[in-house]
Amino acid sequence: MKILDELNARGLLKDCTDRTGLGDLLADHAPVSVYAGYDPTSASLHVGNLVPTILLKRLQMAGHRPIIVVGGATGMIGDPSGKSDERNLLDDATLAKNLAGIRAQLSRLLDFGDHPTGAVMTNNAEWTRGIGFLEFLRDTGKYLTVNYMMAKDSVKSRLESESGISYTEFSYMLLQAYDFVHLARAYNCRLQVGGSDQYGNITAGCELSRKLGEQQLFGLTAPLLFDSTGQKMGKTSTGERIWLDPALTRPFTFYQYWFNRNDEEAPRLVRLFSLRPLAELELLLDEHEKDRSKRVAQIELARALTAWVHGEDAVTSIEWANQIFKAGTLGGLSGEEVERLLEIIPAIDVPRADLTTGINVVELLARTVVESKTAGRTLVQQGGAYVNGVKVTDIKHQVTVADLAASRALLIRGGKKEMRLIRAV
């Protein structure tokens, strides 16, 4: 299957400036250099950044060369696309820290080997900071009209908002267009990819190259990630963003985020992100449809993304921990295994002193799996409370240090799904 047909079949192709021309370029001139840009607003990438990254990954697997542009220059301005307000400008120290973090993460997601399709990391500050304002206006700004720029959705939506758009952010499109032209000159980069909210900025680069009388450039976007409710994906139910940095989002939480996708979302996301061939995935998804209770698609999705972002060892550790959660007890685990479990799964800390004197089970439930003592009392009375896999039916029951495995931790469950790991501190 040709790469554009595969991207389309996987649900990764939304917009393309010239599909026929791009298809011919990719087929006849491999390796083609293709770039995606990343704004360094944080030292870690997040789930939304996986969309342009999987595009680069698939194109690299098809024999093309990814170029990463980390926006050391444009990151100091801020892209108005998809934003309702202007973002805070970054100082040099913060910017340098964020650039280093992003570089490290992308080096695990793409192949940066020394070969024709090995990825290249660049920083647009390298070619923009030495350009004077008047020089930029003369050599670049005059080629894109204000009318053309105002017609773009990213600008139009901000113009119609209460906050409006500053000239600083308005100029972002020009800088990104210049990036594309520079990369075409320096690396013969002919294609830019990104999420669909970037299409206006991408096409501006294609237009600038055309106005300059240079070679044809191409743009391709993938749909943004939305869940079944129409909300942007990438945050937990409590509003916490899902980061790629394991120090910010534990691999266990990352895995569970994908495993908990519903049966309508999971097949679409598996096609997007699993690196298996499509033919294999279709067989797997047929199996998923035969018995959705087995969550075949969700398991493949969680495994594929966790292995890509955190490595195969992380998947092995998480699935070991999941088996313990499924059993509902820490009984039989050695002290070393309990410590390993605490490293994998986020735990709720409870003072050891409280357990020494004894914590009423209703109170412990209220601290961990239910919203109130009233709800905890009801849970116990209805037979839905478990401590280390043992049902507790007495609302006066005390949980003590004797319930701790290896004198360190215990499991408490409310109902069928609400399980928490408790650590004595």
Image (cartoon, rainbow, N blue to C red):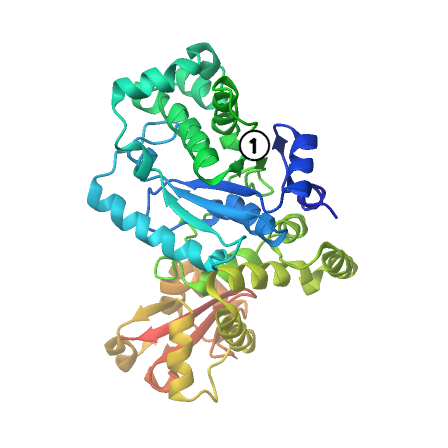
Q: In this view, does 173 lie to the left or right of 318?
A: left
- Residues 374 and 140: in front is 140
In the rendered view of the protein, which quadrant contains the C terminus?
A: bottom left
Q: Position of residue 122 (x, y in %)?
A: 38, 45
Q: Is residue 148 left or right of residue 163?
A: right
Q: In this view, does 92 lie above or below 328?
A: above
Q: What is the crowding at mark 1: few (fewer than 14 residues within 10 Å), some, or many (at least 20)?
A: many
State the residue at coordinates (51%, 47%).
66
- Residues 160 and 393: in front is 160
Question: Looking at the image, can residue 397 be seen?
Answer: no
Callout 1: SS = strand
Tally the numbered discs. Answer: 1
- Residues 411 and 301: in front is 301
Q: In this view, does 318 lie above or below 336?
A: above
State the residue at coordinates (45%, 16%).
149
Q: Where is residue 56 in the image (x, y as percent from the top left)?
A: 54, 47
The amino acid sitting under disc 1 is Gly
State the residue at coordinates (33%, 85%).
407
State the residue at coordinates (50%, 29%).
202
* Quarter of the image where one finds residue 81: top left
Q: Position of residue 320 (x, y in %)?
A: 52, 76
- Residues 371 and 24: in front is 24
Question: Looking at the image, can residue 135 be seen?
Answer: yes
Please give the residue where the numbered disc 1 appears in the rendered image: 219
